[in-house]
Amino acid sequence: MSGMKRHRAGRSWSAGLLLSLLVLGPAAVPGRADEAGPRPPLVYASEHGGADHPDPPLPDLDELPLVPPLPDPFEWSDGSGRSTDFADWPRRRAEIHREIEHYEIGRKPGPPDELRAKFDDGVLEVSIEVGGESLVLRSKVALPEGDGPFPALIGIGSGTGSLPPELIVERRIARIAFDFQQVMSHTQKRGREPINRLYPELEHIGAYSAWSWGISRLIDGLEQLGDELPVDRSRLALSGCSFAGKMALFGGAFDERIALTIAQEPGGGGAAAWRVSETLGEVETLGRTSRAWFRESMFRFAGGNVARLPHDHHELMAMVAPRALLVLGNTDYQWLAEESGYVSCRAAARVWQAFGVPERFGFSIVGGHPHCQVPESQRAEVAAFLDRFLLGDESADTRVARHPFGEVDHERWTRWWGSGKPVLPEPSGGGPGPAE
């Protein structure tokens, strides 16, 4: 790939695994050993284990090459080669992390100068101080009966997000509600949001940077409280729908302490790939999404410039790997660009496959139900991901790939991977049919 190069050798993940074992205990142990050796961890001890890696090249728009197909998630950012070895993934993931920050959402602030947490009368309160300014996040927490510790779901907007409450309650999963407006409103007024009291210089960031920061600070609060709040921090999930489905995806991608992410109907700017959506008509393309949610400079990539982005949203999903991710779609709403989401999911799945943990990623795209309501036909799939990755039931079947796009040639978007020649061939008819 001329002009856009990708480099940096990766380090072994053994050091990160050791830290996870020391801090989180058994949940950080790889799923099981097999002939290929230990499997990648199910969750990590730190928010961003690659934070110490140097930035990749971040060229200006006019210096970026045109890459019409989906970028290769295994290729180094300086073009020096590619690696599917999991030992190299922490550095490659850090490159994608930085590219998405730089070109789409703005840099996610790090941990604050001071953070204090308390839990009283069913409310988790996290007080954050930066530069003499303060911000308080309050979240309602519903705990199952008993002593715990309990796995927990952080639901955006409510304790279960848009997931059916009975699926969560009957599994004795704690529910933690994230009130995103305490950080930034749905239609932010730049520079005048709660987070800007702490970071006045970050008026350019998109809401998905700010909201991801807020989710991470809630997790900091859980860590600080320890046994005082009986939540198993090695079994945390995050879920939301629509714009909050995007929020869940960004939150899970940008915090490695989240074991399971469930992104429901996230549409354009979520699971759907910007490049693919640009070919589909009246859908949420890069140029049509909300300017409040992303940094203003991202919109230079609208239209024909979308092929100059050095990444796409199959790589946003891939940032969750090797942890667990379930994407739920709804074909009844054209705006959601579900064909694009399907192509993007097929591409992202190859990352989990390369690392030998394909059961940790699934997608289910079905219609016949209202927006942000999980139909009966998807409930077993959600239940399986909860059972396996929050309750530890390895017999739960999470190999989910449901879709109505059997005639879509998804492979043409990724056929170039490994060749170094980013060419997008014309579509061919036929493809793998729906997998139930």
Image (cartoon, rainbow, N blue to C red):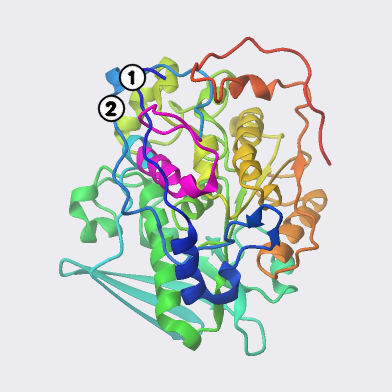
Relative to residue 228, is residue 209 drawn left or right?
left
Any magenta on residue 94?
A: yes
Label 1 CA crowd tier, 10 Å (few <14, some 14–19, many 20+): few
Question: Magenta span has 345?
Answer: no
Residue 350 versus residue 225 in the image, above or below? above
Is residue 292 visible in the rendered image? The answer is: no
| Drawn side of residue 379 relative to residue 199, left or right | right
Above or below, 136 against 77 in this view is: below
Name which quarter of the figure residue 265 lies in: top right
The residue closer to the viewer here, 226 or 41, is 41
Residue 59: mark in rendering? 2
| Location of residue 150 in the rendering, given as x and y in whole percent from the top left corner | 62, 78
Q: Position of residue 309 (x, y in %)?
A: 40, 26
Three-letter residue code for mark 1: Gly
Residue furthest left as drawn = 132
Q: What stretch is highlighted in magenta?
A: 74-99
Nearer the observer, 293 or 106: 106
Q: What element carries label 2?
A: loop
Q: Which residue is drawn at 54% across and 43% down?
A: 85
Q: Earlier in the sequence, mark 2 or mark 1?
A: 1
- Do the residues bearing badges 2 and 1 touch, measured as CB atoms within 8 Å? yes
Looking at the rendered image, the quarter that the N terminus falls into is top left
Q: Residue at x 43, y 42 (%)?
A: 92
Q: Name the residue under label 1.
A: 3
The image shows residue 324 at horizontal and vertical percentages of: 62, 55
> The residue under label 2 is which amino acid type?
Pro
User: Residue 145 at what x, y percent from top left?
Assistant: 67, 87
Mark pair 2, 1: CA separation? 9 Å
Residue pictured at 40% horizontal, 57% vertical: 48
Q: Which corner quadrant holds the C terminus? A: top right
Which SS class for mark 1? loop
- The mark total stands at 2
